[in-house]
């Protein structure tokens, strides 16, 4: 129950309105530490409830220490994409709905006039993409002096997208802050470690995978395939299942265009997202998918970053991703907070090495399935070591002190 987390009644009321009954694993782990004012280094993929895991303690902090005068944002949340920024902003508004706290969002792709209006108001929480925020800092239309909490959401994506320098500069500008939190789907790789070392002070590491409950709800399996045509036939068969809302991932934009045509020529209606799509088209495609009007969404990884659609029943990897962490990211779109999900990968002979990496990364061999009439001609070559299933570990930290004590102790 959220009661045990010592949150203000205004926040728990909002959670009840939002239909959140009990905290997810990452929320149970991250919220108590963040409420103590400690820096947080969180490994939490999309779908684990990470957004509320940082929004709730940030909002609680603002309520514990109300501002005397209006001013610029005290909590900054940086996200890699504008879509994610908008989603975090929507959640921030919902969580603070019964408070007087104000939230704003500024992202690339939206005109500066709108930003000006946002930044001219007194703000408590500002969600922003790094590039656009930095432009405002440079133009002196935003000052970092009042930032008390800095949150990086999907930090690994920010690195992938080349935002490291800008984020470092924003972090330097916000050097008077009291707290920083870094959330990332994976904490592997030197980039993310350098990032964490430079931005966080003595952080407490928390991990969503400590309670693999959310991930455990995803059934994962593989169909071996011979070539594009075979994959297409398998996909068409899989899309035939009723009552599904499915994201199909492909590796490139060109591939997306080909697959879209192939499916449309089989009278299968699809909507799609691709990078560099005008914002209004993206929003329209997502709306058709969200409403269930068109239950199949084709996307590349770039295009699908940060999208949050509830009740996705299936994730199909028409093409396997190049790395295991992207696989985890992709399948995290389904099986969210309480719902079951299925993740199916179509695997060609040349994908076997990546498949092995994925299996080692998730410590779980993926079941091979076949469909009568669509059996693969090629036999699976054995690559690398066999993966044994690992037991999920549980290392949840207990919440320690009462809300009022925690900050005064730190300050
Ligand atoms: P996130 O990982 O933040 O993208 O959250 C994934 C989904 O889970 C979102 O649709 C949230 O609204 C939802 N969610 C987050 N926390 C909870 C909770 N404690 N109970 C139920 N749903 C939740």
Image (cartoon, rainbow, N blue to C red):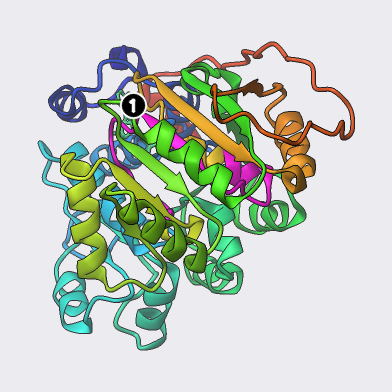
Circle 1 SS class: loop
Residue under the image location 51 percent in, 23 percent down: 215
Range of magenta residues: 304-327
Q: Quadrant of ligand 1?
A: top left
Q: Does 313 appear in magenta?
A: yes
Specify the quadrant of the image occupied by residue 40.
top right
Q: Which of the 4 image quarters holds residue 328?
A: top right
Instruction: Give coordinates of residue 142: x percent, y percent.
Output: 32, 77
Q: Is residue 193 visible?
A: yes
Can you give x and y, in whole percent of width and height, for residue 99 in the image? 12, 40
Placement of 338 over or under 105, stated as above or below: above
Crowdedness of circle 1 by 10 Å Cα count: few (<14), some, many (20+)? few
Give the quadrant of residue 3.
Answer: top left
- Extreme residue toward the front, this view: 373
Residue at 28% x, 25% y: name it: 7
Q: Is residue 203 toward the left or the right of residue 243 in the image?
A: right
Please state, as top left, top right, bottom left or bottom right, where the N terminus lies in the image. top left
Residue 78 seen by the camera: no
Q: Where residue 337 sits in the image (x, y, percent)?
A: 36, 24
> What residue does disc 1 label?
241
Q: Nearer the viewer, residue 203 or 17?
A: 17
Identify the residue at horizontal 61%, vertical 46% (top origin): 320
């Amino acid at each position: 129950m959220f009661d045990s987390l010592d949150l203000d009644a205004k926040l728990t009321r909002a959670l009840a309105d939002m239909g959140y009954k009990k905290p997810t694993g990452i929320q149970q782990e991250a919220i108590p530490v963040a409420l103590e004012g400690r820096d947080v280094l969180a490994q939490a993929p999309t779908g684990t409830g990470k957004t509320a895991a940082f929004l709730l303690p940030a909002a609680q902090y603002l309520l514990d220490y109300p501002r005397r005068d209006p001013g610029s944002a005290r909590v900054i949340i940086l996200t890699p994409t504008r879509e994610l920024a908008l989603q975090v902003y929507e959640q921030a508004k919902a969580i603070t709905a019964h408070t007087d706290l104000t939230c704003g969002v500024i992202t690339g792709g939206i005109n500066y006039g709108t930003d000006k209006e946002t930044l001219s108001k007194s703000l408590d929480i500002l969600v922003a993409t790094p590039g656009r925020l930095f432009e405002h800092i440079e133009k002196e239309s935003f000052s970092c002096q009042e930032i008390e909490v800095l949150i990086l959401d999907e930090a690994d994506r920010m690195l992938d997208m080349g935002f490291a320098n800008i984020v470092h500069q924003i972090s330097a500008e916000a050097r008077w802050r009291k707290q920083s939190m870094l959330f990332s789907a994976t904490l592997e790789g030197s980039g993310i470690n350098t990032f964490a070392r430079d931005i966080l002070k003595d952080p407490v590491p928390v991990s969503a995978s400590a309670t693999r409950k959310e991930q455990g709800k995803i059934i994962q399996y593989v169909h071996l395939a011979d070539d594009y045509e075979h994959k297409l036939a398998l996909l068409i068969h899989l899309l035939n299942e009723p009552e599904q809302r499915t994201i199909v991932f492909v590796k490139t934009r060109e591939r997306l265009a080909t697959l879209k045509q192939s499916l449309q020529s089989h009278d299968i209606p699809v909507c799609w997202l691709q990078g560099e799509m005008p914002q209004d088209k993206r929003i329209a495609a997502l709306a058709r998918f969200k409403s269930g009007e068109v239950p199949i969404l084709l996307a590349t990884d770039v295009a699908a970053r940060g999208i949050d659609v509830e009740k996705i029943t299936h994730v199909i990897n028409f093409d396997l991703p190049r790395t295991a962490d992207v696989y985890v990211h992709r399948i995290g779109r389904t099986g969210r907070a309480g719902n079951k999900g299925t993740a199916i990968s179509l695997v060609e002979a040349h994908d076997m090495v990546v498949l092995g990496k994925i299996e080692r990364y998730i410590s779980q061999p993926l079941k091979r399935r076949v469909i009568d009439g669509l059996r693969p001609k090629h036999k699976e070559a054995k690559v690398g070591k066999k993966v044994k299933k690992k037991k999920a570990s549980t290392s949840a930290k207990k919440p320690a002190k009462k809300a009022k004590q925690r900050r005064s102790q730190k300050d």
